[in-house]
Image (spheres, rainbow, N blue to C red):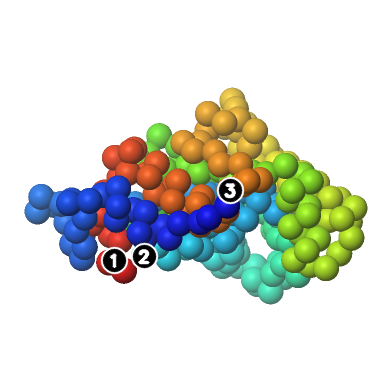
Amino acid sequence: MSTQDPYAFLKAILTKDFETGSPHINGKPHDPLIITLSRDYGARGEVIAERLASCLAIPLYDQEILERVAKQAKIDAFKFKPQDETVSAGISTFLYSLMTGTAGEMQTYRRQLYATVLELAKQDGLLVGRGAHLILSGRKVFRVRIVGSKLVCAKRVAEEQGIPQLEAERKVYEVNTKRHKSILNLYGDSFEQCSLEHAQNFDLVINTDHISAESAVSLILLALRQAGFELHRRIPPT
């Protein structure tokens, strides 16, 4: 399957109205371009996030979200720096446990997470995970979810990490389970439907079993434009 350069793809669909360099539209500052991206482990979400942020020339926030929360909570970042993706997926739960695990501390952690995400959302940015799609619900944001089947995701993990397929399948299951539980624990009492399986919480869901990272970026760019975001004001020429 051939892939397409997302820059060339977007320039083609924008045709004559492609412009660059202006942060203003009709003399007024544009609204921040905020994208949230939730992903299954092994579905290439991180790669897609990096390429999308680069293409749009906007900041990418992933681990930095937790580092900011940890700073506010006066917790050394090294205590929860991930050694592998399994640990990374459980960071939110782990960080909460460092704050004693009481109901009051849980509220404190959640409040600091909300404050961090809301602060980042004041300017252009792509926020990965942490339930940002829920925190920013009701705002003008574009919420993306990247998924994949367990077997395909595990095959990628096995190839990338040089581990047996069965071990990779177990790892994919563990990471995704931790991510789902973290979302439910953090937002279950605030949102009636907060499960990552609830497609209505997202504007675009992409299964990457048969779609490359480059093609996924192109799809997201097209969907953003169709949703009314002024991408041609941000993307540099190639």
Q: Label 3: how many residues lie within 10 Å, few (<14), some (14-19) or many (20+)?
A: some
Residue to which mark 2 is pinned: 57
Find numbered disc 2 in the image and state the secondary structure of the residue it sits on. Answer: loop
Cα distance in 3D space between marks 2 and 3: 23 Å
Q: Is residue 43 visible?
A: yes
Q: Position of residue 7 (x, y in %)?
A: 36, 60
Mark before the other along the chain sequence, 1 or 3 = 3
Residue to which mark 1 is pinned: 236
Mark before the other along the chain sequence, 1 or 2 = 2
Asked if the residues shown at circle 2 and circle 3 are in contact, with their CB atoms under 8 angstroms apart, the answer is: no
The residue under the point 61% across, 42% down is 207
**Residue type of the residue flagged with mark 1:** Pro
Find numbered disc 3 in the image and state the secondary structure of the residue it sits on. Answer: loop
In this view, the mark in front (1 or 3): 3
The residue under the point 18% across, 62% down is 22
Q: Quadrant of residue 74?
A: bottom right
Find numbered disc 1 in the image and state the secondary structure of the residue it sits on. Answer: loop
**Residue type of the residue flagged with mark 3:** Ile
In this view, the mark in front (2 or 3): 3
Q: Position of residue 2 (x, y in %)?
A: 53, 55
